[in-house]
Image (cartoon, helix red, strand yellow):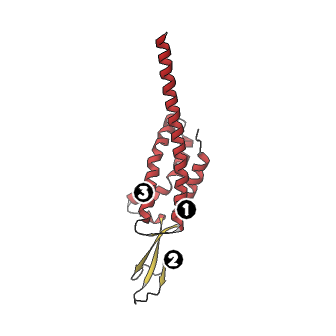
Amino acid sequence: MNTFSGVKQIGAVILALSLFAPLGSCEMRGTPLSEGDPTTSNQVDPWGGDQYISTFHAYEYFLERDPLSWLAGLAFLWPLGLIAFSRLLSSERAKRVLMFMEPLLVCWTAYILWGVILFRTTEWGWYVALAGISLVTISVAVNVFVALKRLVGRAKSSHAGRAASGAD
């Protein structure tokens, strides 16, 4: 069924765990919004102003009053949900539809990860997320390739069967 399902599961777990890892940091000047925030660290600025480093985590995407922010945060959780959902499905057709949706979801997650590093310095959690989505991408690519190969093989065999029956 799924050629690389174990690789996809490992990648999905790694990607989900990266939700809580620091993805990026940004050096700022001024006063931190919250002095007791553990994600900021104060440093002495030789020019007289306060300098601090703000660290960004993926779970910070989730804002209670903004449902669209949930979509960005869910980019780290969709592989686990899709694996669980595909196990519950009994229809092969529905599983195929999910399988061909996965490349779009991989691109969406890659876009979210790219957005994280656009104006920030990457932290170790970003590399963990990249490793997770890379494993998921490899699994999705192999599964789509195998499915397309099967479809082409069926089309060729049905075409050859029609040609043979027409020749009789």
* Residue that protrudes farthest toward the top in the picture: 168
Where does residue 148 sit, x and y in percent of width and height? 50, 36
* Whether label 2 touches label 1, CB < 8 Å: no
What secondary structure is found at the residue carrying circle 1?
A: helix
The CA distance from mark 3 to mark 1 is 16 Å
Where does residue 49 sit, x and y in percent of width and height? 40, 87
* Whether label 3 touches label 1, CB < 8 Å: no
In the picture, residue 16 is in which quadrant? bottom right
Q: Nearer the viewer, mark 2 or mark 1?
A: 1
Circle on res. 111: 3
Q: Pick the residue in front: 137 or 108.
A: 137
Is 31 on the left-hand or right-hand side of 84? left
Residue drawn at (48%, 46%) of the image: 102
Vertical order, 3 against 161 (above or below): below
N-terminal of the two: label 3 or label 1? 3
Circle on res. 50: none
Circle on res. 38: 2
Residue drawn at (49%, 13%) of the image: 165
Kind of residue at badge 1: Val
* Residue that protrudes farthest toward the front in the picture: 167
Q: Quadrant of the N terminus?
A: top right
- Judging by the rendered image, the residue that carries numbered circle 1 is 128
Kind of residue at badge 3: Tyr
The CA distance from mark 3 to mark 2 is 28 Å
Vertical order, 168 against 133 (above or below): above
Q: Pick the residue in front: 162 or 83.
A: 162
What secondary structure is found at the residue carrying circle 2?
A: loop
